[in-house]
Image: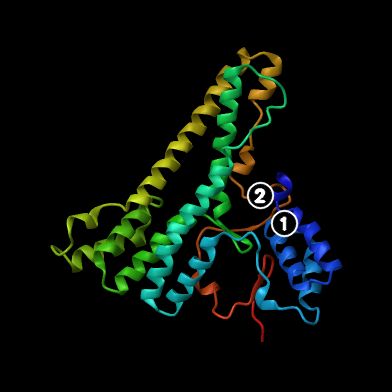
Amino acid sequence: MDLFKNRRAYAYLHSCYTKTDQITEAASAALTYMVKHPGDTVMQKNFENSIETPGVNKTEIVDMEEKKFVELFVAGILALNDKNWENAVSFMESSVMQYIFDENQCRAYCEGEFDHGFLPDFISAIGNHFTNALYCKKNCSMEMGQVRGKFYENMFAAHYKYLQMAYYEVKKYEESYRTGLSYLLFDKHNEDMHNNLKLISKEHKGLLEKDAFKDRREAAEYRERQLYEEKLIAFIKREFESTSSDIESNEEEYLNRKPIGEEELYSVNSSDDDNQRESEIDPATIEEGTIYQTPNRGYHEEF
């Protein structure tokens, strides 16, 4: 399954599309592969050759594995850039729900079978299957931050930052306050957001309903799950380390192996995946008229 999870299958698919003269599809396969492997210069060259081939339809070159929320999120950013606040709210709200759905699909995949490699005892088998699934689920949140060749931390939280702005502009101050509070669940020391909420409280003192001072339910549930899983991982690491000396030799090697890997928990991809990391999303980098995008070069426009 790693062949598909790491998108290596798209390198073969690119070759097949090229040999059958399906150049637009070949370019899409190459782009899809490069999102995970932006440092692959051979595939970069193949992609450039594909898009320069006469007859290729550049408007149809897409990341074939792109999460569905991305299109909604980008549309929301474009609406913000255009100061089209109503559309920004609509797209961002839709993106929040789609993001949760997309991540839950990824998490469901983690519940599948687990190859133990040998036959451990029953308790060890359960414990290590659970640990593997837990690491896999944590990786899902990292995968969701991978958008069009770049990695953004706190992608889910970013929705609430932009919703706070958009709701304020359409004079829905209660929703603006709630989305601001929801953002602070993930970035509690953000001074800009604290100042925004103070401004709303000052301007509309006594006019905000009681519900305005509550975090949004889906944001609170997401953060609670996130913190719970982080505590579980810390507990597992601590307990595995403290009991390793009491484990039989064959079980010790098995139990102490990293189910997915600590490196992968805090990085999007494996060693050959060198995606650019971004802590913040800069709306100015997303321009209307974008036709296609390559991981190494950013957005390109067709003139």
Which residue carries the number 2 mark? 269
Q: Residues within 10 Å of mark 2 (few under 14, many from 20)?
A: many
Question: Can you see residue 274?
Answer: yes
Q: Is residue 133 above or below residue 271?
A: above
Q: Is residue 38 visible?
A: no
State the quadrant of the N terminus.
top right
Foreground residue, 121 or 224? 121
Q: Are marks 2 and 1 in contact (CB under 8 Å)?
A: yes
Disc on the earlier residue, 2 or 1: 1
Question: Could you tell me the amino acid type at mark 1?
Answer: His
| Residue 94: image tag | none
Residue reaching furthest to the bottom: 303
Question: Which of the image's four quarters has the C terminus?
Answer: bottom right
Judging by the rendered image, the residue that carries numbered circle 1 is 37
| Residue 182 found in image quarter | bottom left
Helix, strand or loop at label 1? It is loop
Q: Position of residue 262 (x, y in %)?
A: 61, 38
The number of numbered discs placed on residues in the rendered structure image is 2
Characterize the local packing of mark 1: few (<14), some (14-19) or many (20 or more) Cα atoms within 10 angstroms: many
Task: Report the residue at 15% width, 64% height from top.
Answer: 205
Answer above or below: position of 29 versus 111.
Answer: below
Q: Amino acid at mark 2?
A: Asn
